[in-house]
Image (cartoon, rainbow, N blue to C red):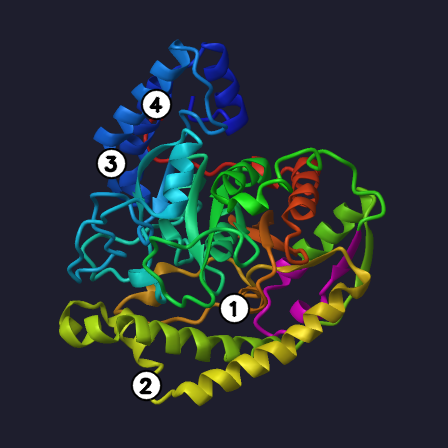
Amino acid sequence: MTELSIPEAAARMAEGSLTAVALLEDHLARIEARDGAVHAFAEVTEARARAEAEAVDRARAEGRPLGPLAGIPLGVKDLIDLEGRATRGASRVPASPAKADAKVVQRLREAGAVILGALQTYEFATVGPDESLPQPPSLNIWNLEHITGGSSSGSAAAVAAGLLRAALGTDTGGSVRSPAAYCGVVGLKPTKGRVPDGGLLPLSPSLDHVGPLAATVREAAMVLDAISAPGWRPATPSGDLLGQPLTGLRVGYARAWVAGDPDCDPAVLRALDAAASTLSLLGARITEVEMPDYALFEAAGAVILDAEALAVHRERLAEHWDLYGRAARISLMRAIGLDEEDVRAAWRAAEILGQGVTAAFEGADLLLTATTLAPASPVAAFRGGKAVWTPMRTIPFNLTGHPALSLPAGFSGGLPLAAQLIAPHGGEDILCRAGAAFELATDHALQRPVYPGSR
């Protein structure tokens, strides 16, 4: 039953051939069999999940209307509040139980979802897995010696290992899309402002986005629909546009943005060229576009992110310095010496660079580029609390607020590769339309790793 897509499971529950309790039990058994290897969950909230599943089954038996995610087990990153549970962000730093669910969790519950628990993250969404923390970091199911990427590490690990069909993560500089890329799943960063951020443990409030990771584009779109603010819901990405042909769609291929980088793995460029070819065969018109200097975008984003992260943690860091992991302390200390004028200058630079993204869209409906420039790094590179730089193409769209979708696009050395599509603001419908068409035309998302455990 855990292999059923969300639409398939929802249809079976609606007709009465599957119960929410049975679906939950199968997920719990899968977690018991596999999560000891990948460490996706920070906590399984089994008792409340059972109560929610039983409530869905009662509602169906009584003939009450069911929400679009009724009975579907989902998980949320351990930066997203679950009422009564301390949101720890993978840290030893003390935290009080949340007084209420985060707004996105409230919306998932309103849609009928069964929240199965909190998923691992890098400490407070800073850089890198840290084996000195209370729980072991999430591992990549495709090769357990490699990272999942972060900081939505547990969300990616859970979907890739078949523990959940979808989960929520947060994305500040690529933290939904890069783990999705490294783990071979779909990651969707929405337009800034589409999804409410109340009840989150922030990293950089100006750049933070909540978004889904999922086994397929359609399932990511369904979750996005559920968590979107009401004003965004009429243009739903899981609606009629999914399944329509791509004839005439204009795709700007930012090839030089990737090909000119010495850190780009040749396999990534080959995968992107193949993705462009596939979209062309599906009817899209591909033209190459120029993008602003990524290094400048990354530098501006780092100033903003680092300054805001230190502001968020300054008081707790002073009180609980010894409880923070080494990697988190190094990350947060990067902002020492930055002042408000530095942040304003970084935003001015980001706005100028953003004009280059706007120019790239002048002849294009979507942009195509890489998510990451290489497959997942070995875990060993991060041991000792080391902060290791991993080359990506993600943070510009946190600065500009554009929606972006990471899609499985191939493999190198047995590890997943990804392509990234970017749409104009509010363009999640066309983004998911193109992503679903690409997914259907290729077998990348159908590939499965060798799973640990018997289920």
Q: Residue at x 23, y 49 (%)?
A: 98
Q: Residue at x 42, y 57 (%)?
A: 149
Residue 12 spot, x, y in % from top left: 49, 15
Above/below status of 325 relative to 273: below
Task: Decide which of tag 4 and tag 1 comes sooner along the chain.
Answer: 4
Q: Read off the magenta span.
A: 250-269
Residue 222 spot, x, y in % from top left: 54, 36
Image side of residue 270 versus residue 280, left or right: left
Which residue bears the numbered disc 3?
45
Which numbered marker is on residue 336? Answer: 2
Name the kind of residue labelled 4 in the image. Answer: Asp
Task: Decide which of tag 3 and tag 4 comes sooner along the chain.
Answer: 4
Q: How crowded is mark 4: few (under 14 residues within 10 Å), some or many (20 or more)?
A: some
Tell me the CA gap for discs 1 and 3. 35 Å
Tell me the CA gap for discs 4 and 2. 48 Å
The mark lying in front, picked from 4 and 1, is 4
Name the kind of residue labelled 3 in the image. Answer: Thr
Tell me the CA gap for discs 4 and 1. 38 Å
Residue 156 visible somewhere in the drawing: no
User: What element does badge 1 sit on?
Assistant: loop
Above/below status of 139 relative to 455: below
Which residue bears the numbered disc 4?
26
Residue 63 on the magenta span = no
Q: How crowded is mark 3: few (under 14 residues within 10 Å), some or many (20 or more)?
A: some
Q: How crowded is mark 2: few (under 14 residues within 10 Å), some or many (20 or more)?
A: few
Name the kind of residue labelled 1 in the image. Answer: Pro
Residue 63 spot, x, y in % from top left: 43, 11
Q: Are marks 3 and 2 in contact (CB under 8 Å)?
A: no
Q: Which of 22 and 375 is in front in this view?
A: 22
Which residue bears the numbered disc 1?
391
User: What element does badge 4 sit on?
Assistant: helix
Q: Do the residues labelled 1 and 2 touch (CB within 8 Å)?
A: no
